[in-house]
Image: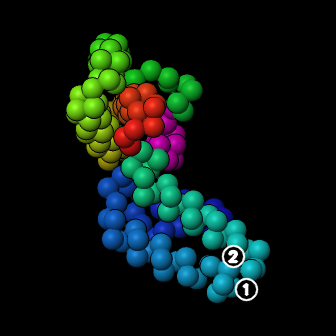
């Protein structure tokens, strides 16, 4: 079971769009089979249980799932392509200024947080669509780089959300 990818380990197709009910069902079925209470603390089952838990954590989180799929496709790492899309760079300063302006105002902060959470969701959806259409790409390297840039933008939004809520408020 050690050379299975996360999707195979969970009995799911290798795709960004995941059926949440199937993910949960497959995870629970498989976790019962390898759980130490069921297997008697066999070292191999402990390893299988840990691998299954890691697979579940990655596949259920859209950002981590997209990152994982990009790595399986041979895409660039965050270190090798560190910039978000070019059009996003212009927006960074504006977003940082909006955060500073919104911090003292609870309503403005909540509005900006909702906007940033929605933006992150749209970016992850975009990355998912890019991943799903990767096989049809005429320039695979460019497509992989575009996916990395989209994921970098989503990561940047995560940082903005953290900065917005650095005093402990919000999500």
Tell me which corner region of the image, top left, top right, bottom left or bottom right, holds residue 50: bottom right
Give the number of the disc on residue 71: none
Q: Position of residue 105 (x, y in %)?
A: 27, 26
- Residue 37, can we see it? yes
Q: Secondary structure at mark 2?
A: helix
For the point 47% across and 47% down, the residue is 64
Give the number of the disc on residue 45: 2
Of residues 80 and 137, which is closer to you in this image? 80
For the point 32% across and 14% down, the residue is 97
What's the magenta bit mostly, secondary-structure-wise? helix
For the point 38% across and 43% down, the residue is 171
Q: Are marks 2 and 1 in contact (CB under 8 Å)?
A: yes
Q: Position of residue 55 (x, y in %)?
A: 53, 60
- Residue 51 counted in the magenta span: no
**Quarter of the image that includes the N terminus:** bottom right
The residue to which callout 1 is attached is: 40
- Residue 68 counted in the magenta span: yes
Q: Is residue 83 above or below residue 42?
A: above
């Amino acid at each position: 079971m050690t050379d299975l990818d996360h999707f195979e380990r969970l009995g799911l197709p290798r795709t960004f769009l995941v059926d949440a009910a199937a993910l949960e069902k497959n995870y629970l079925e498989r976790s019962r089979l390898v759980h130490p209470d069921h297997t008697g603390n066999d070292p191999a089952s402990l390893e299988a249980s840990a691998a299954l838990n890691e697979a579940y954590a990655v596949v259920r989180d859209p950002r981590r799932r997209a990152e994982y799929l990009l790595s399986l496709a041979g895409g660039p790492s965050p270190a090798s392509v560190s910039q978000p899309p070019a059009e996003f760079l212009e927006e960074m300063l504006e977003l940082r200024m909006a955060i500073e302006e919104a911090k003292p105002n609870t309503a403005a902060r909540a509005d900006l947080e909702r906007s940033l959470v929605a933006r992150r969701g749209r970016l992850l959806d975009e990355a998912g669509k890019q991943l799903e259409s990767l096989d049809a790409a005429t320039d695979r390297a460019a497509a992989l780089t575009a996916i990395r840039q989209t994921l970098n933008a989503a990561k940047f939004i995560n940082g903005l959300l953290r900065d917005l809520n650095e005093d402990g408020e919000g999500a």
